[in-house]
Image: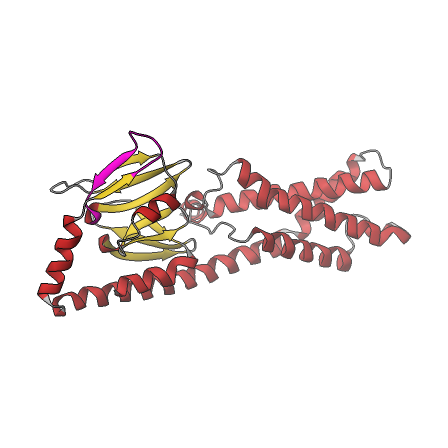
Amino acid sequence: MFLYRLLHWLRAPFPSLCQPWKAVVYSTLIIFIILALFRPFGIAQSGSKQWLFIMGSTLSSALCTALFAYVLPWIFPEWHAERHWTVGRHILQQMGMLLCIAVGVWGFNCWVFGMLLNWRFLVLCVGWVILLAPFPTAIFLFWNQNLLLKRNLQDAMSMNEALLKRLDALPKESNQATQAAKEEMQEQQLLLTGDTRDSQLTLLPSQLLYAESCSNYVKVVWLAEGAHEAQSRLLRLTMKQLEEQVMPYDVLTRCHRAYLVNLRQVKQVSGNSQGCQLRLSACEETVPVSRSYVKKVKDALLQ
């Protein structure tokens, strides 16, 4: 039972870094404070060079943190994608970063103090990191996850309320105005064109479920008339180009830097520590909503 709960927790969604610079700055400040207060890694025995040891170790730690916050996500974007990021991956990343910090501190100080890569000092650096790092790392992990979960659940609740208000208001609208709007939307065929001759798709705006950016392509998912399962196709264009082509239709809106959704197909909104998820009709996949798009989506649902 414990093992099952542990695995379930490790597989739980966890928010990826939206502002990596904050992780670098805050981590560097915490490391500086720990070094200045506790004087680990033999700092207390370095005499007049204590502050050189502290500043150099802090700089090494900042570079290691920047490596994991910027460089590795750029080299391995799929592994660091928000939709795949879990508590387990975050812990693994933190362990790798802490090991990198220990090696960085060791290498810098071996170079400055001419210790010729003293392996006993490496063991000392790793030991101090193992001793000092887990407690603040665990506190930040739980605090950040719970804070984001609470915030995103509130956002999901507010969007569900907006969705219910829109559904309740439909019968009260003028039947003629509603029918005219539907007919106008259905009469106008939506032509999505990409950068190549065969990268074209014609469909009704109401049939479009969502679109997802996939490298140099956009995956368009739609539900054809009379069909029970959604279809998809890759078009060679950018999300910005797609957004410009669907601009006349207010219900087709951007909800994430990599997603565009048909808000008339949304049936429910759920939330977790990664953000809000839109559940669509006739579609098993969920569409994420970025924090920066929450207000826009909520206001659009009320229209």
Instruction: Classify residue 264 by image quadrant.
Output: bottom left
Range of magenta residues: 193-205
Residue 78: x and y in percent read 46, 37
Using residue 28 as the reference point, say whether residue 257 is left or right of it: left
In the depicted structure, whether residue 122 falls above or below residue 274: above
Q: Is residue 254 above or below residue 111?
A: below
Q: Is residue 231 visible?
A: no
Left or right: 199, with 7 as reference point: left
Q: Quadrant of residue 156?
A: bottom left
Residue, far right: 48
Give percent across and percent down for residue 74: 54, 39
Q: Can you say whether 281 is above or below 108 in the image?
A: below
Residue located 65% across and 41% down the image: 99
Q: Is residue 201 above or below residue 153?
A: above
Report the residue at 29% width, 46% height from top. 210
| Quarter containing the C terminus | bottom left
Q: Say whether residue 203 is magenta.
A: yes
* 250 is within the stretch colored magenta: no
- Is any atom of residue 209 visible in this view? yes
